[in-house]
Image (cartoon, rainbow, N blue to C red):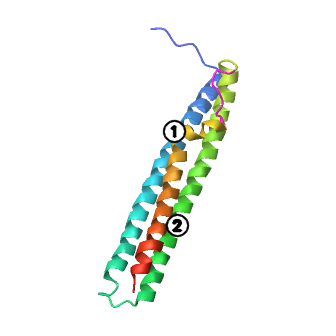
Amino acid sequence: MTNPAPVDKVTAFEVERYKYILQQLHTVNENVYRFLAIYQTLATVLVGAALALFVRYEDWGIRPGTARIGVVAILLLVTFVALFTLILIVMGMFTWWDYRKEECEFTGTAVRKDFRKPPEVGNIWRWYETWIGLFILLSISFMWLAAGLVIIPAIG
C-alpha cells in the first residue's frame, strides 16, 4: 500500500475554503424555500383567520366596523410577513452573489482564468428567487384587491 502524497497546508486550506464557499451557496439556495414555506404557512393561517372573521363576525357578536378593522389588521400583518420574507430573499440574493463572485475569483486563480463565469445581473429572470418574490408580491396584491373590492364592502 502506498501512502498518498502529502498535501501542503496552503492547498489543504484552499480545498477547505472552496468546500465552504460551495456549502454556503447551497445553504443560501435552500433558505429561499424555507422563507417561502414560512410565508405560505403564515399567509394561509392569517388569511384563513380574516375569512373566518368575515363569515362569522355576526355570529360572534362583532360590530361591522370592528370586523372591517380586524380584516385590515390581519392583511397588514400578512403584508408585514411578506415584506420581511422579500427582504430575506433579496439579502439572500446579495449573499449568493458575493459567494458566487468569490467562487469565480477562487477558481480563476486555482484552476485557470475564467474557469467559472461570474454572475450577470441580466440573468435575474432565470433566478427562481425572482419568481418567488414576484409570487409573493402578486399574492399580497391579490389579497388586498379581494379585500378592498369584495370582503370589506360586504361587511355590514
**Helix or strand or loop: what does disc 2 sit on?**
helix
Left or right of 61 in this view: 91: right
Q: Earlier in the sequence, mark 1 or mark 2?
A: 1
Pair 1/2: label in front: 2
Residue in the image at 60% along x and 30% along y: 18
Q: Is residue 54 above or below residue 11?
A: below
Identify the residue position indicated by label 2 in the image. 79
Residue 52 x %, y %: 33, 76
- 106 relative to 126 in the view: left or right: right
Residue identifier under label 1 = 26
Residue at figure coordinates x 54%, y 40% from the top left: 127
Give the residue type at disc 1: His
Q: CA distance from mark 1 to mark 2?
A: 28 Å
Instruction: Please give the range of residues in magenta.
Output: 114-120
Q: Quadrant of residue 88?
A: bottom right
Q: Residue furthest top?
A: 1
In the foreground, 118 or 128: 128
- Comparing 151 with 133, the one in front is 151
What x and y, as percent, mark residue 47? 40, 69
Q: Is-magenta flag for residue 11?
A: no
Quadrant assignment for the N terminus:
top left
Kindly report the secondary structure that dominates the magenta region of the rendered protein. Answer: loop
Q: In the image, is 44 to the left or to the right of 115?
A: left
Sort mark 2 into few (<14), some (14-19) or many (20+) by Cα contacts within 10 Å.
many
The structure residue drawn at horizontal position 41% and vertical position 75%, both measured from the top left corner, is 151
Rendered view: 44 above or below 148: above
Residue 92 horizontal/vertical position (percent): 58, 48
Of 156 and 23, which appears nearest the observer? 156
